[in-house]
Image (tube, rainbow, N blue to C red):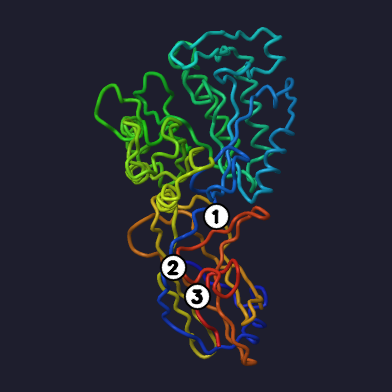
Amino acid sequence: MRVGTLSIAVLGIAGWLLLCGVALAAAVRMEPADSPVDNPLKGLVPYAGESAERFPHSLEFDYLPLAKLLTGPGQYDWKPIDDKLVAISGRSCQAVFRVWLEFPGQPSGLPDYLAKAGVKVTEWRDEQENPPQKHFTPDYEDERLVTALEAFIAALGQRYDGDARLGFLTAGLLGMWGEWHTHPRPELFASKRTQERIMTAYERAFQRVPVLLRYPAGPGNSRLAPNAHLPFGYHDDSFAWGTLDTGRREDSWFYLATLKMAGTMAMERWKTHPIGGEIRPEVWGQVFDERPSHPKAQDFATCVRETHVTWVMDSGMFRGGIDPARVTRAATQVRRMGYDFRVVTADIERHGEHGVAVALELVNQGVAPFHRDWTVELGAIAADGSLVETWPANWTLRGIQPGGMPTRWETSMERITSRGRACVLGLRVVNPMTGGKRLRFANAEEDRDATGWLSLGLLP
C-alpha cells in the first residue's frame, strides 16, 4: 500500500540527488537488535528528579495541589507547572502530572478563596491506613467548586495542550490522590453528574495531549459515570497487584475485571488511546525478580500483555543498591511495553529513467501503538557522518498496531546526474520537544553512520 509520495521539489531533493548519486542498493534485510529502554513516551516512570541515573527512562511524574494553581476566580498561577516542565525537560524527559484536591496526610488542596466562600470540607481519619491518615474531602457537589474546576481545566488546556514537554495528563481533581474514589467513604465522592462535567471539560480542553482516567466504566456502573465511549485512556494504579482478572468477587475492582464490565469499547481502548498506571508500591521493583517475594504480586509480563500498557510509575528501580539481575530483567520487560518498532526491510531502487523509489517494511513488536504523530524524516548521510540533506516523509508511526502483517511505507523522488559522492540513506523520527530523547528502532543499524539516524542502505 502506498502511504505517501514526496514531491519532486521538496527541500531541494534535486540538489541532494546531484550530490549523492543514483546507483542504488536494493532489498536490504535489516538486522534486529534490542530497542533502547528509554525510548520516549513509554516505560518506567519515576517521580520527578528521582535518581535519574539508576534506570533508563524518558518520562517523569509529579503531583500538584489545586490550591497552588487556582488562586482566585479565574486567577491562575502557572509557575509551579512551568517550573516542573522546565526541570523535567532539562533532563531530556517529558512529564506526566496530576492535580489533586485531597491527598491523605496532606493539607487540603481546596483553593483558599473557595474555602473562605464556604465550600464544605469533611475532615476524617482513615484507620485502615498504616499509619492512619487525615483526609480533607471537599463537597464535590458544591456548584462553586464544580464551576471552578471546569474553568480551571479549560485554562489548563489553553496553556498546555500541545506542549511537547507534556507527555500525558491523568485527570485527577476528584477523590483521594485524584484517583476518583474516597474509599472507604464512598458517600463523600463526586456524583455521576459532577464526573460527567469534569470529563466533558477535559474532552473540550485537550485535543493533543492524552488524558487518562483512573477507572473504566460502562453504563451499568453504580458509582462511576460511563466513560467507555469517551476519548480518554486509562491508568491502572495498582499495576501487577490488582490488574489481572481473578474471577473472584472480592477482586471485582481489579483493572481487567472493571475493563470487561465496562464493555467492548473499553476493552479495545488501548488501540486508540494510551494505557498507563503505577506499579503497586508494595511490589515496587520486586515484580522484576524471577520469583517476587510478595504473595499478591502478579506476573508483570502477563499484566503488560493483557493491558497493553505503555507506561507505569515505579520507584523500585530508581533506588540505590539494586541487584543487577533485577535491572536486566526489568529492561527486558520494559522493552515490551507500549510500542517497539523494527524496520524489517529497506528497498532502495532506481525507478524508471529519472527516479528513485524507496520502500520500507516495519513491524510493531510491542503491545500498543504509538499515539503521537511525530515527523518522520529521510536524510542523506555522508561518509564522515555529516548530513548532506534532510527532508520530511509523508509517513506516520501513529496508530500502527502490534502484530499482524508489516506496514509498508513507500515514496519516490526524481534522480539527476550524479557528481559521484556516495551517501547512506537514513531514517529518523523527530521528538518535537527540544532536547527530547529520540524514538529509536529495534535495529542494529541505529546510529551506525550518524547519531540519531537508522541507516537504511547505500546511495553510491
Instruction: Say whether disc 1 or disc 2 marks the residue closer to the N-terminus.
Output: 2
Identify the secondary structure beneath mark 2: strand
Residue under numbered circle 1: 373
Amino acid type indicated by mark 3: Leu
Q: Is residue 81 above or below residue 119?
A: below
Q: Is residue 426 above or below residue 310?
A: below
Q: Earlier in the sequence, mark 2 or mark 3?
A: 2
**Residue 382, x across and y down, in percent:** 63, 81
Report the quarter where the C terminus lies. bottom right
Picture residue at 74% right of the left edge, 20% below the top: 72
Mark 3 or mark 1, earlier in chain: 1
10 Å crowding of disc 2: few (<14), some (14-19), many (20+): many
Amino acid type for the residue under numbered disc 1: Asp
Q: Is residue 1 left or right of residue 261?
A: right
Along the viewing direction, whichever of 221 and 170 lies nearer the viewer: 170
Disc number placed over residue 456 in the picture, else none: 3
Q: Is residue 255 visible?
A: no
* Residue at left offset 64%, top offset 87%: 18
The answer to the question of whether label 2 and label 3 lie on touching residues, with beta carbons closer than 8 A, is: yes
Q: Nearer the viewer, residue 119 or 37?
A: 37
Residue contact between numbered discs 3 and 1, judged by CB atoms under 8 Å: no
Q: Amino acid at mark 2?
A: Val
Task: Name the residue tied to disc 2.
Answer: 343
Q: Secondary structure at mark 3?
A: strand
